[in-house]
Amino acid sequence: MENRDLDQYRIQKAIKLQERPTYEDFGSSSKDLKNKLEEIREELGKFQDKLYAHGKYGVLVCLQGMDTAGKDSLIREVFKDFNVRGVTVHSFKVPTELELKHDYLWRHYIALPARGKFSVFNRTHYENVLVTKVHPGYILGENIPGVNSVNDIDEAFWENRYRQINDFERHIAENGTLVFKFFLHLSKEEQRQRLLRRIRLREKNWKFSPGDLKERKLWDKYQDCYELAINKTSKEHAPWYVIPADNKKAARVIVASILLDALKKYKDIEEPELDDEIKANLETFKQELEKES
């Protein structure tokens, strides 16, 4: 488990999702994976403090995956040791009336991390080339000039969206946002088992919606849309990582490891030095405080 090849998860050329693994355990027990995550996230928490003090970069973590892929629990477990002032989670649902009065990227742009902070997008701007591509009728609610019916939503329309998303991510990356995109790659059988658990376990009933079964019937369409979106938009400045998600504990370790490994490469992220005058008088300040006792 110590010698994981993290580059195997990074998408640097066109892939076929059906050829990518959905399960990993590194030959480790559940307890070992839990302990490893605790070790990594403690380091991530320390890095977040340093990033906050440095104040020049923001970090955007994008999570996508089919229903039950484990996005919520991954966020809870990976970012548990973060100072709450340094991380914000945004869960993007159906656009509101206000959001629909703007372009589709607007609500994501205003949720980007401030310098020194992390933003986690639980579902992301990629919903606009995923769920809307499976259900193109949703596009009509955006009131886009020239789009009056689903017949106006052709391949050129989607190619423009991929270009717009690439431009958006390039722009924010060039202005100090470090972008990480994770697709939690779940098998159809594992999703079936997780949906069944939501029905069988009373304490998980609230998570179940009949709509999940309707969307499940469109599994192949969603997989095609994910594969195309990943291949079109995995760039050096905003890479996609395809994470085996059938084993939640291993998926969390992989995501946390990728974040820590990549962020540690930014050697310029350090706590700022104290002003020389303040540093020279630290002993005086200490003595002043100690006299109060």
Image (cartoon, grey):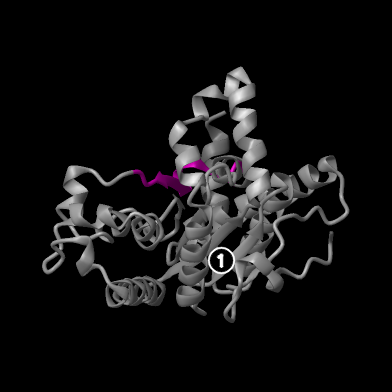
The residue closer to the viewer here, 266 or 121, is: 121
Q: What x and y, as percent, mark residue 99?
A: 21, 50
Picture quadrant where residue 131 is located: bottom left
- Residue at the top extreme? 202
Residue 273 visible in this rendered orientation of the protein = no
Q: What x and y, as percent, mark residue 208?
A: 51, 30
Is-magenta flag for residue 90? yes
The residue closer to the viewer here, 59 or 274, is: 59
Q: What x and y, as percent, mark residue 37?
A: 73, 48
The residue closer to the viewer here, 71 or 23, is: 23
Picture quadrant where residue 164 is located: bottom left
The residue closer to the viewer here, 40 or 98, is: 98
Q: Is residue 62 above or below residue 241?
A: above
Is-magenta flag for residue 280? no
For the residue labelled by badge 1, is the local secondary structure a helix, a strand or a loop? loop
Residue at the spot 30% in from the left edge and 60% down from the top edge: 109
Please state, as top left, top right, bottom left or bottom right, where the C terminus lies in the image.
Answer: top right
Please state, as top left, top right, bottom left or bottom right, where the N terminus lies in the image.
Answer: bottom right
In the figure, is residue 96 to the left or right of 183?
A: left
Picture quadrant where residue 198 is located: top right
Residue at the spot 44% in from the left edge and 45% down from the top edge: 89
User: Could you classify mark 1 by the number of other residues whose Cα lies within 10 Å: few (under 14), some (14-19), or many (20 or more)?
Assistant: some
Q: What x and y, as percent, mark residue 36?
A: 78, 49
Residue 175 visible in this rendered orientation of the protein = yes
Residue where numbered disc 1 is placed? 270
Residue at the spot 59% in from the left edge and 19% down from the top edge: 203
Residue at the spot 37% in from the left edge and 47% down from the top edge: 92
In the figure, is residue 82 to the left or right of 136?
A: right
Q: What residue range appears in magenta?
A: 79-93
